[in-house]
């Protein structure tokens, strides 16, 4: 098995990034992460980011890029990420406002396949990161996630499974880790609490708030502090031979976001020692 590295996402500290991206990167390094997964570049030039990452000896795991923005300038977008040193680019899925059908999914797959081929020419791997809404659609007997991954060649698109979102959406994390074990170089460990996951409903309605009884008391939690059974998933994850684990965490609800990231990292490292 490859030596697994640990990355911090920027979503949970996005407000801090707006104020001072480089101060955030310094804090992420101080906590002990090996790399960072960007959420845009917050007005910084690629060369500035590359220099700061080199100074901190921090890796650019990758960045999330909007599907439609990517289509506008495929090669230009990739070159920017190559300049920063990104190993991966995560492309967004279809917007939640679109009701997908076979034709829409086929067009998405066609475009993503071509984008993935260009990424490969630059030694960058294109990733698809799931949320929960992919499980709400049926495309000729398959949910949206399977429809996209099964139809897109593995050498054009790899999978960045978010284990928490899979289970919130009603899927089984172990099933998806096993099914796509040969194309999961990056795995997101998102954790959460709910009294009953089946009664959570649409968590996106909550905004920055915790859920009440109508949402089964849902809340995001640091990795290892919720109800996702990561020890039971450990063998499935290891079988994927991932290069990176990401401490994916959305909201700290007034707690120190960096503290949540710190205990998430500690948990992930302890998990791999089991």
Image (tube, rainbow, N blue to C red):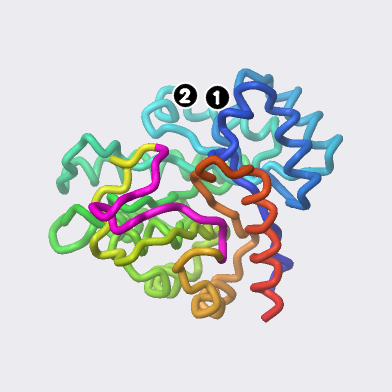
Of 233 and 243, the residue lying toward us: 233
- Residue name at image x 63 percent, y 28 percent: 17
Q: Residue furthest front?
A: 213
Position of 266 compared to 119: left or right?
Answer: right
Q: Secondary structure at mark 2?
A: loop
How crowded is the residue under tag 1: few (<14 C-alpha within 10 Å), some, or many (20+)? few
Residue 80 visible in the picture: no
Q: Secondary structure at mark 1?
A: helix
Question: How many numbered marks have been drawn onto this rendered protein structure?
Answer: 2
Q: Is residue 103 above or below residue 166?
A: above
Position of 26 compared to 247: left or right?
Answer: right
Q: Name the image quarter holding the N terminus.
A: bottom right
- Report which residue position mark 1 lands on: 76
Q: Quadrant of residue 43?
A: top right
Residue 141 image offset from top left, x and y in percent: 15, 63
Q: Which residues are magenta?
A: 208-224
Q: Quadrant of residue 243?
A: bottom right
Of 171 and 117, the residue lying toward us: 171
């Amino acid at each position: 098995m490859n030596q697994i590295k640990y990355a911090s996402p920027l979503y949970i500290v996005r407000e801090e990034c707006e104020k001072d991206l480089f101060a955030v990167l310094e804090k992420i390094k101080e906590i002990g992460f090996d790399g960072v997964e960007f959420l845009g570049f917050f007005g910084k030039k690629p060369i500035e980011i590359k220099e700061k990452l080199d100074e901190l000896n921090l890796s650019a795991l990758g960045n999330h890029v909007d599907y439609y923005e990517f289509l506008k300038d495929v090669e230009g977008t990739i070159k920017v990420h190559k300049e920063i040193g990104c190993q991966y680019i995560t492309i967004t899925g279809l917007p939640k406002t679109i009701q997908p059908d076979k034709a829409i999914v086929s067009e998405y797959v066609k475009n993503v396949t071509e984008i993935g081929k260009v990424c490969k020419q630059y030694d960058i791997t294109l990733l698809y990161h799931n949320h929960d809404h992919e499980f709400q659609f049926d495309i000729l007997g398959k949910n949206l996630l399977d429809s996209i991954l099964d139809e897109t060649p593995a050498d054009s698109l790899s999978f960045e499974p978010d284990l928490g979102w899979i289970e919130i959406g009603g899927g089984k994390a172990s099933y998806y880790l096993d099914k796509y074990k040969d194309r999961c170089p990056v795995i997101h460990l998102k954790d959460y609490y709910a009294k009953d996951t089946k009664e959570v409903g649409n968590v996106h309605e909550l905004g920055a708030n915790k859920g009440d009884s109508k949402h089964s008391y849902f809340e995001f939690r640091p990795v290892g502090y919720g109800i996702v059974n990561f020890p039971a998933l450990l063998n499935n994850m290891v079988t994927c031979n991932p290069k990176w684990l990401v401490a994916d965490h959305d909201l700290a609800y007034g707690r120190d976001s960096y503290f949540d990231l710190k205990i998430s990292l500690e948990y992930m490292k302890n998990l791999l020692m089991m």
